[in-house]
Amino acid sequence: MSSRPELQAPPEIFYDDSEARKYTSSSRIAEIQAKLSERALELLALPDDGIPRLLLDIGCGSGLSGETITENGHQWIGLDISPSMLNVALQNEVEGDLLLGDMGQGLGLRPGVVDGAISISAVQWLCNADKSSHEPRLRLKAFFGSLYRCLARGTRAVLQVYPENLTQRELILSYAMRAGFAGGVVVDYPHSTKRRKEYLVLTCGPPSLSTAAPLGKGEDGESCSDDESSGDEENQTVSISDRHRPRKKQKINKKGKGREWVLRKKEQMRRKGNAVPPDTKYTARKRKARF
Amino acid sequence: MRLLTHNMLSSNIKGVANGFPLRIEVEKVVEKEVEINHDFLRNIFPKIDWKALSDASRIMGYHELPEEPPEPSVLEADIEFLRKFHHALLELHLEEGALLCPESGRKFPVNKGIPNMLLLEDEV
């Protein structure tokens, strides 16, 4: 099983000249990147008015995703940490402007100037502590904070990620929420190990009325028609998490709070240091109505 | 790097209160013709910091832009103005040079049109 690139070296070292060449000359990779970029643009839900927008491409690499943006008629600014990858983008004469920078240091853009942001296979790199001074949480905070600021109200960021595990996914999502984003994760082909792709769809500010929760692909016959269908109708997996934390669930049924709950509460009080009567067989026993 | 991008870029250095706009040091400017899109120009205009754009274009050698921002009605009617706006925003490229933080003076070099915005450990 091949190791994840994120575990081998920091991105500016992993994506050196030879890797950059490999990455860009592989037609399979190019095709996948194009598909991911098209899907990300789709999830951006830009208004269908024919007006070109200014988008951000985070981790633009060799410009494969940027080319998709150009093909869709928009302007873009790309940011990447690997000089080798950016050199390839230059050779490809991409239309967007390129910046050599580290997203974990903050994006350095003026507030509210960008109409949308996409990122293909890049944000999970933030979760690694490559240098001793790198604290992933600080980097995630700087990234999402600056991303939130530079987006115009009501616009979106769509980040296609490859989280290593559930913890990483939760970490990324939690820092996005802390920065003020609303939104959730859209999963395409959730049951196919090969085709499964995750997109963080984040909205900056109050969503417009026309914003409906995007459906993950692979949940109806239409989306699957041009791929070899595995036959089963996969369910959409969309978790919409709001900034406001969900209320704590309380198990209250018709019979009241139950003996276990009472015992737990009494134990809590004891730990706090309160004087609590001892637990006996009479604890939380059902009393007569007129007790 | 086009002036569209320069107009959005700010210095991110720790301790700097206002890192915008970055001062431009020109070594080489290239002009690349690009198809004009009036819708894009009208849409992006409210986001542009006009003074920064006007000053920057002058440093890059283009003196056609007015110093004062135009009235929005000008954008609707004046095609000639739109052409100048388009030229300054999208057709002037800083190929070699540097961008300087207005407060700290720290240089961000620009090579082959790509600004190096990487911060050092103590600047984050």
Image (cartoon, helix red, strand yellow):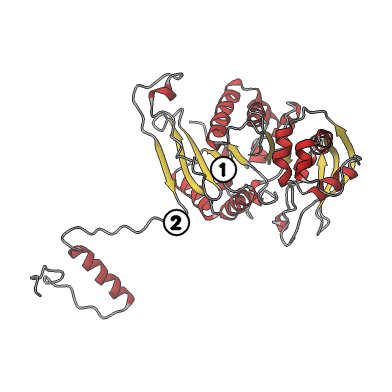
In the image, what residue type sits under mark 1?
Arg
For disc 2, the chain is A
Q: In which quarter of the image is the C terminus of chain A?
A: bottom left
Residue A16 is left or right of residue A190, and the answer is right
Front residue of A27 and A250: A250
Query: In the rendered structure, which disc, 2 or 1, sits on the residue that comes first in sequence?
Result: 1
Residue A35 is left or right of residue A283, and the answer is right
* The label number, if any, that marks residue A266 in the structure image: none
Front residue of A212 and A287: A212
Give the secondary structure at mark 1.
strand
For mark 2, what is the residue?
A244
The image shows residue B64 at horizontal and vertical percentages of 90, 40
Q: Quadrant of residue B26?
A: top right
Residue A122 is left or right of residue B13, and the answer is left
Q: How many numbered marks, from 0 up?
A: 2
Residue drawn where x is 57% and y is 22% of the image: A28
Label 1 crowding class (10 Å Cα cut-off): few <14, some 14-19, many 20+?
many
Q: In the rendered image of this protein, does residue A229 appear above or below residue A12?
A: above
* The label number, if any, that marks residue A156 in the structure image: 1
Residue drawn where x is 79% and y is 52% of the image: B21
* Gap in angstroms between the C-alphas marked 2 and 1: 19 Å
Residue drawn where x is 65% and y is 26% of the image: A71
The image shows residue A220 at horizontal and vertical percentages of 38, 27
